[in-house]
């Protein structure tokens, strides 16, 4: 009875069997014992250790195994016989501690996480548990009552967007001030039509958002916006012959708003006193200079200012 070769399984008939031929048998044995590893200089039979090193080269592979469009190719540095991840895939594979989200710079990849700040706290998910999320820091939410981290905005009505906050929001840096005339006032400043720039050198009741009032005559607008300007002056020494009394707001040295009484002599009190006041919202540009002026006409320069206040408040 014939036998089967041990390496590639060829059946070789024995002498006396049909199809037996000594030359065929010898040839089949030689084929079975041939080096099938494919090594460039010969190798070992398959039966001893399988495929020898270097026996399967890149050229012998199906082209789909190493295709640049799949991100897999050959490593030029390690030789054409080694498959390699290409471009950014290699950088991603070599990353350690994969936490956060991937960023790319050319063929270099990194894992990044959002950094917390004094206002925002980030939860950096690992990609399995969810997406990154952010929340306001507790130092912000402690001043807000109701639902934490929430500001309710109503639907726009006629182009107006309303934001609802509870409680009232306070801004300690909103530009504003209130100053008074120095005790005893100032004497004999107008009455003959003199334009007098009023100094408010007394008590400053409050000032926020910087030293925008210079403690004397002038407020400097720190921001462009709408301001509410108020002044009132308690005048003394008015006589019956005086007519127009005028209190004015000047911006950058030019009169822009005024309020007057056409006959102060007729409406003064028994002591020759009369109060002139002005209240005016005004659009100011950052750097504008605001002063208060007083003029009273048709008399001698005997009108004094006994008391008064000057205030400016930024509205929006």
Image (tube, rainbow, N blue to C red):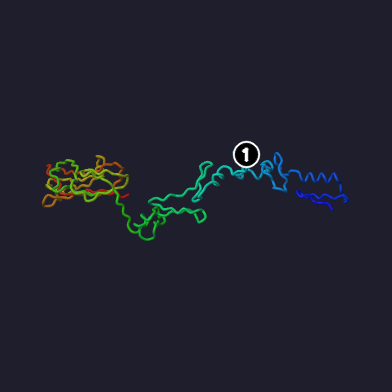
Q: Furthest-bottom residue in view? A: 146
Relative to 10, 139 lies left or right: left
Q: Position of residue 225 (x, y in %)?
A: 32, 46
Relative to 301, 63 lies left or right: right
- The residue lying toward the viewer, choosing from 303 and 264, is 303
Q: Residue at x 21, y 43 (%)?
A: 217
- The residue lying toward the viewer, choosing from 96 and 3, is 3
Q: Position of residue 298 (x, y in %)?
A: 14, 42
Asked if 108 appears above or below 151 in the picture, the reply is above
Q: Residue at x 56, y 42 (%)?
A: 87
* Label 1: element kind: loop
Number of residue marks: 1
**Does any portion of residue 130 appear in the rendered image?**
yes
Relative to 160, 278 lies left or right: left
Which residue does the numbered mark 1 point to in the structure image?
79
Q: Position of residue 291 (x, y in %)?
A: 23, 43
- The residue lying toward the viewer, choosing from 225 and 8, is 8
Asked if 86 appears above or below 151 in the picture, the reply is above
For label 1, the crowd category at 10 Å Cα-Cα, with few meaning under 14, some 14 to 19 and many 20 or more, is few
Q: Position of residue 248 (x, y in %)?
A: 22, 45
**Does any portion of residue 276 appear in the rendered image?**
no
Q: Residue at x 29, y 44 (%)?
A: 222
- The residue lying toward the viewer, choosing from 308 and 105, is 105
Q: Quadrant of residue 55?
A: top right
């Amino acid at each position: 009875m014939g036998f089967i070769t041990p390496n590639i399984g060829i059946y070789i008939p024995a002498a006396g069997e049909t199809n037996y031929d000594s030359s065929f048998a010898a040839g089949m044995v030689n084929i079975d014992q041939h080096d099938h590893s494919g090594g460039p200089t010969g190798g070992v039979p398959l039966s001893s250790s399988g495929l020898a090193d270097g026996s399967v080269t890149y050229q012998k592979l199906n082209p789909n195994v190493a295709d640049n469009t799949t991100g897999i190719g050959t490593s030029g540095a390690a030789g054409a016989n080694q498959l390699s991840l290409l471009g950014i895939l290699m950088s991603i594979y070599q990353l350690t501690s994969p936490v956060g989200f991937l960023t790319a710079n050319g063929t270099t990849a990194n894992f990044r996480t959002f950094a917390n700040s004094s206002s925002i706290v980030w939860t950096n998910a690992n990609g399995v548990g969810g997406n990154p999320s952010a929340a306001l820091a507790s130092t912000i939410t402690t001043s807000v009552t109701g639902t934490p981290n929430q500001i309710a905005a109503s639907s726009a009505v006629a182009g107006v967007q309303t934001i609802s906050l509870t409680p009232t929001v306070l801004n300690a840096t909103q530009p504003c001030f209130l100053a008074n005339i120095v005790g005893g006032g100032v004497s004999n400043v107008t009455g003959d039509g003199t334009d007098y720039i009023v100094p408010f050198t007394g008590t400053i009741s409050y000032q926020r958002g910087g030293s925008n009032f210079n403690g004397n005559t002038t407020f400097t607008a720190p921001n462009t916006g709408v301001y509410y300007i108020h002044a009132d002056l308690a005048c003394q020494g008015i006589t019956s012959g005086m007519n127009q009394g005028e209190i004015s707001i000047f911006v950058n040295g030019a009169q822009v708003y005024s309020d007057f009484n056409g006959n102060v002599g007729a409406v003064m009190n028994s002591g020759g006193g009369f109060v002139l006041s002005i209240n005016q919202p005004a659009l100011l540009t950052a750097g504008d200079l605001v002063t208060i002026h007083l003029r009273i006409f048709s008399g001698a320069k005997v009108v004094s200012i006994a008391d008064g206040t000057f205030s400016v408040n930024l509205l929006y």
